[in-house]
Amino acid sequence: MTGLGWALADSWTIARRTLLHWRMQPGLVLFNWFFPVLMLLLFGGLLGGAMESPEGSSYYELLVPGIFALSMLFGLEGTMTAVTTDVSKGVTDRFRSLPMSSAAVVLGRCIADMLDSVVTLVVLAATGLALGWRWHEGLPSALAAFGLLLLLRFALLWVGIFIGLTVKNAQSVTMVQVLVWPVGFLSSTFVATSTMPAWLGTIAQWNPLSATATAARALFGNPDPSATATWIGTHAGLAALIAPAVLIAVFLPLSAHRYRTLSR
Amino acid sequence: MTTERVIEAAGVRKNYKGGTDGAGLNGFDLEVTAGTVTGLLGPNGAGKTTAVRILSTLLELDSGTATIAGFDVRRQGAEVRRRIGLVGQYAAVDEVLTGRQNLVMFGRLNHLRNHKSRADELLERFSLTEAADQAVSKYSGGMRRRLDLAASLIVAPRVLFVDEPTTGLDPAGRMEVWSAVRQLVDGGTTVLLTTQYLEEADQLANRISMLKEGKVVAEGTPDELKTQLGSDWLDLVLTDPADVPRVVELAGPLADGEIRVQDVRVSVPVKDRTKALVAMANSLHEAKIEPEDLTLRRPTLDEVFLHLTGDAA
Ligand SMILES: Nc1ncnc2c1ncn2[C@@H]1O[C@H](COP(=O)(O)OP(=O)(O)OP(=O)(O)O)[C@@H](O)[C@H]1O
Ligand SMILES: [Mg+2]
């Protein structure tokens, strides 16, 4: 096999390790997949009645794509925890002492986490459909929306790998986990940013999570008042491409560098 | 046995960024001959792990040179990694997976075609066949260590690094690991073993390098090291504590250094082994003191160790 062939084979071996984890700990992984569903039901039930939805549509039309985006953000924690655990337990060192492709450790993580996110989205979408959420612009458009969501996940993955390689212990991961929540809430996930106080709405609108949520709503044909309010609101689609691209451009090389300098 | 050097390190220095000055390695030298077990002995923080991580390409050295089977650890890392196995200080196996799943995964990553049969072989060899399909998190410390060893031996390595293999294990677990290491050596693997336990080094190693503050302060076979400290010891165990002062007085002329007394045990450093033993026996006989025990012994490695690392009381 060629170098590239081995790199891919090794990456798949590392990814399979995560798939085996799923099989060994079905309870844990099911919880991870259903946690966003819980959020959807909880916030749908909690806020659904109070929420004024445009054109008399169901609150789920706004909420479901928001939770899609939020679950992409939450995926960050899983990535981070997995990376930190491997570093602190010496598993990463063992990989590094093997004659395997050095890119595979990170690429394998990447494949596994993307698969995880696809499952998360499928479970969420199924629940959403059962609750009355629909896409109105046809399947290709819906798939494009899912593509945007996964792009965000892919970008956040590199943030997760970078932080995971940097903090090196589980306690610091908890701190980051706590910080994920305000980032998640300060966005158009649950409510349109147009209903927030101006300054808060502006921050929320520039949150990459909002861009992806708003762009996904547009592609699904779900109403979102945030979409028209401001420049960033009207250019959500563009922002949903650029923001992840920027994150990737920054954190992919940083992660690669961090991985290489584990030996310093 | 050939005299080929498989590990060579000369003047290796490593200062951790952000670490305290002098921590790490300060001119570390080591030569290991093929087919031998070398013990790297040192107290906490002596630099054992640092040395192992540098030799196994996990850590970059600041200056000096190190080669494994002739390959430079800095410039030919990939070649080095093809020839080594590493058992780190903490068992680095996937705790969620079963023993077998771990070995199959590491086999695949070693680009082994027959990874499944190899995993079975290793499970058998390390007596893990029964527990093969249990999650590693259910393993005992000794079993985990054995799996860790097995994972490092998937592709028979030229050189195996084992960092404190028995720290934290109970005596039974320790024996298990020792016998596993002995088997390896019989198979011709060169082993570099680090330990804080002198007994372990004495049991397993052909040669010992004593490490202190990132430098080798003594090197040789266990016997040579014991001889380096010079005197042998005459140990007396008395029945009556009241005899102790009298015995110390009698032993005075024979002593080549400070006599140590601990309860009814009197330890006398002596130079001329047989002569001292006979003289002591005669004096005791004349004084009508019947000791419970009178023995001549080499210094223990502990004594050598304490002497050389300067922590002697
Ligand atoms: N990553 C690090 N950053 C800074 N200092 C470090 C780092 N790792 C080790 N050190 C320091 O380098 C010295 C040698 O450490 P090392 O881990 O090699 O010792 P050791 O002989 O393996 O000790 P132990 O018996 O505790 O395992 C110690 O003083 C330690 O504090
Ligand atoms: Mg150590």
Image: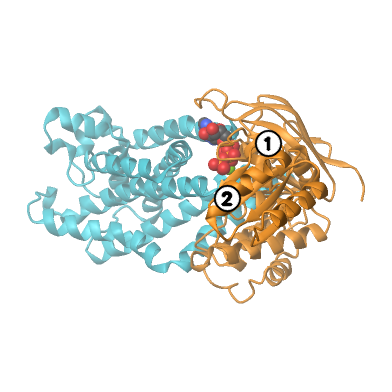
Chain colours: A cyan, B orange
Q: Is mark 2 within 8 Å of ligand 1?
A: no
Q: Chain of mark 2?
A: B
Q: Nearer the viewer, residue B186 or A166?
A: B186
In percent of width and height, residue A141 lies at: 37, 50
Crowding at mark 1 (Cα within 10 Å: few <14, some 14-19, many 20+): few
Q: Which residue is mark 1?
A: B257
How many marks can you see?
2
Question: In which of the image's four quarters is ligand 1 placed?
Answer: top right
Mark 2 falls on what kind of element?
helix
Three-letter amino acid code at the position of disc 2: Val
Q: Residue furthest right?
A: B2
Same chain for labels 1 and 2? Say yes or no: yes
In-image side of A71 versus B133 (left or right): left
Crowding at mark 2 (Cα within 10 Å: few <14, some 14-19, many 20+): many
Three-letter amino acid code at the position of disc 1: Gly
In percent of width and height, residue B210 lies at: 69, 38
Q: Which residue is mark 2?
A: B244
Q: Specify which label sits upstream in the sequence, 1 or 2.
A: 2
In percent of width and height, residue B237 lies at: 62, 57
Name the mark on residue A125: none
Mark 1 falls on what kind of element?
loop
Q: CA distance from mark 1 to mark 2?
A: 18 Å
In-image side of B300 versus A181 (left or right): right
In-image side of B82 versus A164 (left or right): right
- Compared to A86, does A40 lie above or below? below
| Residue ID at (66%, 29%) | B61
Q: Is residue A192 visible?
A: yes
| Residue ID at (28%, 47%) | A217
Q: Is residue A215 visible?
A: no
| Residue ID at (27%, 39%) | A183
